[in-house]
Amino acid sequence: MNNSEAFRAIVENITEDLPLDQAVALIAGIANETVLPSEILLKFDEISAACDATSVLALMEYLFGPGKFAGNTIDFQDPANSLFDSVLGRRLGIPISLSVLAIEVAKRKSFELLPIGMPGNFLVQSSEDVDQYFDPFRGANPLSPRACAELFLSLNPLASWSDSYLRPTTNRAVIIRMLTNLKMIYIQTNNTAGLRWVMRLRLMFQEVADLEKDQWARLMRSTN
């Protein structure tokens, strides 16, 4: 089974929650055939094994304290920020990829961090303290619900805040959003090769295929 087939298998298995670590590892392997998804999963394990944190706060400090993993504020639109061979190698990412890192390392340490798909950013929430959020892109410090709202409004000054933005989302939605980010980057940079493989993965999600199959058909016509 190649990487694309393996990705399709986990997407189509709707009886189980989509495994984030496997999904992001496979995406990296599909984007670059020289990348082995197994090595990315091993790296998650190694990061977790090296971390002796006994609390969520300590875990976040270990991952996102000074000199650790950080948000790529210089080249936010670099697609490498969403591809985990690069994220783990460069220790740089965007909010959603760094949040996935936090979720997966926490899981291996028997903590639970929940994905929060706040528009315009991405956060994680501690399952032990529902009023404790983190923005890995901006560091290890915890955020209150009010601080999250203030962050949203600073990023989206013309928008209105809704408490619903702090509700946990599904792993499936996380991966779709990651692929959406890559799709938009490849469209903006006229990277047809990148757009083609991203669209193939997106169309494996039936809820996406229902909306984007016509766009895919137009893309195929324009590049053949």
Image (cartoon, helix red, strand yellow):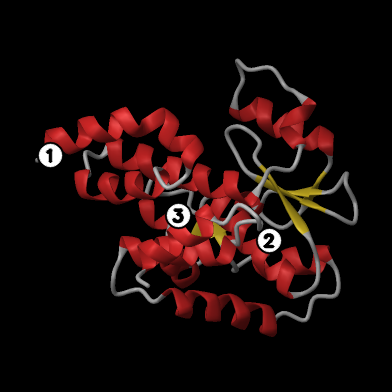
Amino acid on which disc 3 is placed: Ser
At x 60%, y 68%, the residue is 68
Q: In which quarter of the image is residue 55?
A: bottom right
Q: In which quarter of the image is residue 82?
A: bottom left
What SS does tag 1 mark?
A: helix
What SS does tag 3 mark?
A: helix
Where 36 falls versus 61 (above or below)? below
Name the residue that disc number 2 marks. 103
Is disc 2 surrounded by few (<14), some (14 to 19) or many (20+) residues within 10 Å? Answer: many
The x and y percentages for residue 189 are 25, 40
State the CA–CA distance, disc 3 to disc 2.
15 Å
From the image, state whether disc 1 or disc 2 is nearer to you: 1
Q: Is residue 95 visible?
A: no
The x and y percentages for residue 168 are 74, 43
Question: Is 13 left, or right, of 166 in this rendering?
Answer: left
Q: Quadrant of the C terminus?
A: top left
Name the residue that disc number 3 marks. 82
Where 149 falls versus 39 (above or below)? above
Residue 74 or residue 27, whichever sits in front: 27
- Of labels 3 and 2, earlier in sequence is 3
Amino acid on which disc 2 is placed: Ile
Name the residue that disc number 1 marks. 223
Question: Is 162 left, or right, of 12 in this rendering?
Answer: right
What SS does tag 2 mark?
A: helix
Pointer 3 and pointer 2: residues touching (CB < 8 Å)? no
Amino acid on which disc 1 is placed: Thr
